[in-house]
Amino acid sequence: MKKRVALLGASGSIGKNTLDVLREGRDFFEPVLFSAHTREESLLALKEEFPQACLVLSGKKDGPEGIRYFGGEGLREAIARAKADIVVNGVSGAPGLGASLAAIQSGADLALANKETIVMASSLVFAEAEKAGVRILPVDSEHSAIFALLEAHGKERAAELILTASGGPFRTRSAESLAAVSPGEALAHPVWNMGPKITIDSATLANKGLEVIEAAGLFGVTPEQVKVVVHPQSVVHSMIRLNDGAVYAQLSKPDMRLPIHNALYWPRCLPCPFAQLDFTELTLEFKKPDFEKFPMLPLAYEAAKKGGVYPAVYNAANETAVDAFLSGRIGFTDIAGLTRETLSRDWRITADSLQSIYEADKMARDSACRYITEQL
Ligand code: MG
């Protein structure tokens, strides 16, 4: 029987890569739902290719014929009705959390590319997943690598998870020159071709910061057990250090279709047509990340160690700052300044419900917006 697949964020970067995997795997998968935020043309184009799939436009209240559901509420309803076996969540940012919970509650496994789901609400999300008896399969390339390494070696044998970071486009630039970086410069990533939010996050290393929090949540380890190493080639996707000190790595071409392929076919390991690695022209470098030049990374560790809603606040402040940077309202280095300032407030609220997490998220965004208007 074919796996019924729902793809959220079908017009984005994860969505397009997932479509490639679905096209290659027509004998294995039946797409039952596609959602996009506002790009209705890309959604309607999919209808021609996959006429049986239900279409959802989550960022609009209405739209052309052929699209069945609208808005965030519509998306959650569509997921609940889709009876998918697996939901690929490629939604960008905090709205991905509600979609993840809807997917889990529908009884589908969750192929998760939305970091915010785990950053904001990991314990809630895992409690729901356990209740529903579903699996969470990471699609982020680093976490997909660690997932595979832990499956191979056994989680109880792992002492450390080592995330690799490309280092972003400013790895070799001086700290002083970063204040003058324009959105255009920050949007040109040397290795990965991704959406604007995650590309800016790669330039500030906030992406790696979110991934540290995500790794601790996904694999149930302390933030101290998650290490980051800069690896500009992005061929080693992550490593684990076992209790005996031995390090195991996962290597492949930097192509998101491999982690998506792995999540969609899991638990099977089938040939993947996209990611054959050629060793003959490889040089691999590893460097220490520069915590001073890229303060978003130490700030993430700080938020992860404090726990509670601090990771959600880190995420909300960063999202607000990236928006403001992309629209020219603040400078590149203000992203970290604004996040530090927002985190320095008192956020000792209990993160025991979705409501308290959303409340903290909103308060952090309001606080960050006020700081932009008043201080920057
Ligand atoms: Mg990643």
Image: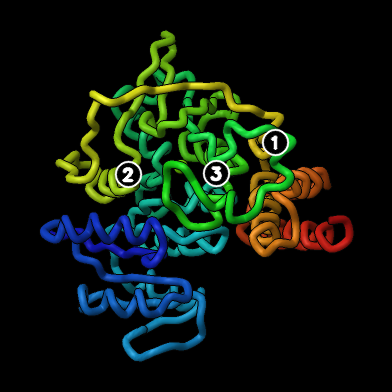
The CA distance from mark 3 to mark 1 is 13 Å
| Mark linked to residue 55 | none
SS assignment at label 3? helix
Q: Residue 264's spot in the image, x, y percent?
A: 26, 51
SS assignment at label 2? loop
Give the crowd class for mark 3: few <14, some 14-19, many >=20 residues within 10 Å. Answer: many
For residue 74, above or below residue 311: below
Question: Residue, x 43% and y 18% (percent of image)?
Answer: 241
Q: Residue 258's spot in the image, x, y percent?
A: 28, 44
| Mark linked to residue 295 | 1
Disc on the earlier residue, 3 or 1: 3
Q: Does residue 98 appear left or right of residue 278 in this picture?
A: right
Q: Which residue is mark 2?
A: 255
For residue 63, above or below residue 333: below
Q: Residue 79's spot in the image, x, y percent?
A: 38, 69
Badge 3 amino acid: Ser
Nearer to me, 222 or 270: 270
For residue 51, above or below residue 157: below
- In the figure, residue 177 lies in which quadrant? top right
